[in-house]
Amino acid sequence: MHPTRRQLMQFGLGGLVLLSWPRFGQADNTRTCRLSPEQTAGPFYLEDALLRQDITDGKPGTPLRLQFDVLELDGCRPLGDAALEIWHCDAGGAYSGVGAGDTSRFLRGVQITDQEGRAEFRSILPGYYPGRTNHVHLKVHLSERDIHTGQLYFPEDIIRPAMARPPYAHPGQAWTSREQDYLYRRREGDQSVAEMQPDGEGFIARLTLVVDTRANA
């Protein structure tokens, strides 16, 4: 049984596993400490996400490894022991836990950042829906505080071919680009586009989050 984020806050985080992965052609000492822009959590946030790395729950789609580096704004230091929570829609644009009696929690999860501020999830490439391009919602929690709410976006030239094929292609509905996404345009979405590279039959997407640990103190 997976502990929930609420239980983690109550009983302590612990159990960290040090992750290691190469940078995408960028040396460790070239980090730029610019505060990551805040974005809306949207209407589908739930407070009982499970502590787990694989959040797919059997949902079809292009395999995706989501890797995050979480840094403190003050000194650009890695932020360990923070709870990084993500959630996103499935290939058809649907979220779990929506509607009366829906107890599913697919494509939702929490990981604890290691000593290097890193966390990784196994998921699928999210779909799209009218008004919103492909995106991943995220929150960073420190103890019982939400210190950052943001979103992750994808390089369009890399993901667009997948959007033209099942299970992503929606008959009668056109794909929504980033420039057609009102939240991307209004909330500095260009600062939240992940680096991306092929990974077997899927992709790795990586994003650095710079957060203010004094937020909501």
Image (tube, grey):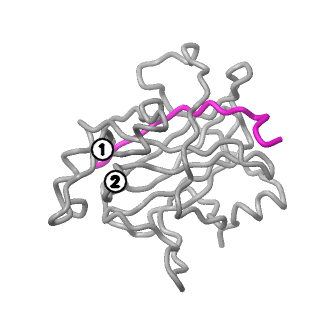
In the rendered image, the residue lying farthest to the bottom is: 101
Residue 130, image x, y percentages: 31, 58
For label 2, the SS is loop
The answer to whether 79 appears left or right of 25 in the picture is right
Residue 100, image x, y percentages: 53, 84
Q: Nearer the viewer, residue 14 or 90?
A: 90
Q: Residue at x 53, y 62 (%)?
A: 43
Give the mark, 2 or 1, whose residue is nearer the N terminus: 2
* Residue linked to disc 2: 131
Q: Nearer the viewer, residue 92 or 71?
A: 92
Give the amino acid at mark 2: Gly
| Mark 2 → mark 1, Cα distance in angstroms | 7 Å
Q: Are marks 2 and 1 in contact (CB under 8 Å)?
A: yes
Write down the quadrant of residue 79 in the picture.
top right
Write down the quadrant of residue 19 in the picture.
top right
Residue 180's disc is 1
Residue 211, image x, y percentages: 66, 33
Residue interval drawn in magenta: 200-217
202 in magenta: yes
Residue 21, image x, y percentages: 51, 33
Badge 1 crowding class, 10 Å Cα cut-off, few under 14, some 14 to 19, many 20 or more, is some
- Quarter placement of the C terminus: top right
